[in-house]
Amino acid sequence: MIQDIDPKHFYNQFQKAAIENSDYIISFHNNMIFAKEAGQDLDFIRYEDFLNRKREFHFTYLFTIDRQKYFLLKEDVELKVPGFAYCKMFDIRRRFPKDRVMAASTAWHLYVWYRDNRFCGRCGKETEEDEKERMLKCPVCGNMIFPKVAPAVIVGVTDGDGILMTKYANREYKRYALIAGFTEIGETVEETVRREVLEEVGLHVKNIRYYKSQPWGFDLNLLLGFFCELDDTTPIHMDEGELSLAEWVKREDIPDYGEDLSLTHEMMQRFKKGEY
Ligand SMILES: [Zn+2]
């Protein structure tokens, strides 16, 4: 999965780090990330690319992978560096190395949080970055704004040798997926599992078992994977607003897309191998 970057290590604890020449700079513009042009390894510009620029820029420390520090460029400007371009977040997923895909996904999540909390939602004044932890605070009313992660479930509904697979309607992602959805305020994740399966395909489930979780910064999520069993005798009743396809697929017919990023794909492959 995207977070499995062993032997490298991802260190995301906040620190007030001083920027250095070799540090990576992540810049977003029009919802795209500034990176090496398509067709090459995923790579980013470094602070040394900013040394001769006339205007002043501001950077916020993001995280470190092994010894490589990443900083976010706070200004929303369109950079120009030969060999680099603003790339769609969806397109960089399949590039290598994987630790930089993980970095891009996490940087996007943090960037959106900083961007969307420039002003206090309580009193409207400009917020400030805290010095000690990842937090934005309002100097006027004292409002403290912490990073926001949206929990969502991925559900492998099984029935003997079959698993329920879906395709989304109106999404860029066209491959098979599993039932998925956000946790609503006031419910447990197990309740999310039951509700989403019922809403999307009209079925009841039992024996809900937690599998694994995954940070998925592309969509600002923490994904929680569950397997469960069909507890119904009625046919699939698909929500056509959410899905374009929902069907039972036998273990041997589950496609292997050959990717090593998503929790969904890992769950499908584990079931294909008869491990769940
Ligand atoms: Zn305020």
Image: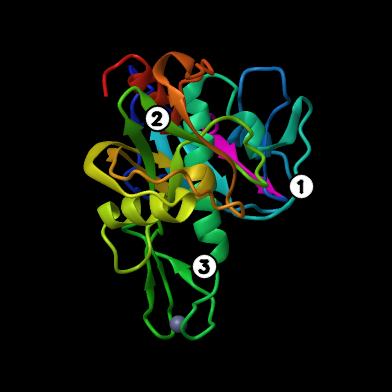
In depth, the one of 101 and 222 nearer the eye is 222
Residue found 75% across the figure and 42% down from its top: 79
Is mark 3 in CB contact (under 8 Å) with mark 1?
Answer: no
Is mark 3 in CB contact (under 8 Å) with mark 2?
Answer: no
Q: Within 10 angstroms of label 2, few (less than 14), some, or many (20 or more) residues?
A: many
Residue 15 seen anywhere in this rendered image of the structure? yes
Residue found 47% across the figure and 69% down from its top: 128
Indicate the position of residue 71 as horizontal and vertical percent values: 51, 43
Residue found 38% across the figure and 78% down from its top: 143
In depth, the one of 257 and 34 nearer the eye is 257
Please state, as top left, top right, bottom left or bottom right, where the N terminus lies in the image: top left
Reading the chain from its start, which is encountered first: label 1 or label 2?
Answer: 1
Q: From the image, tell me which residue sits under label 3.
A: 117
Q: From the image, tell me which residue sits under label 2.
A: 163
The answer to if 28 sits in the magenta stretch is yes
Secondary structure, mark 1, is loop
Magenta residues, start to end: 21-29
Q: Nearer the viewer, mark 3 or mark 2?
A: 2
Q: From the image, tell me which residue sits under label 1.
A: 78
Measured in 3D between alpha carbons, the distance from the residue under mark 3 to the one under mark 1, in whole angstroms, is 21 Å
Measured in 3D between alpha carbons, the distance from the residue under mark 3 to the one under mark 2, in whole angstroms, is 41 Å
Check disc 3 and give the amino acid type: Asn
Q: Ligand 1 is found in which quarter of the picture?
A: bottom left
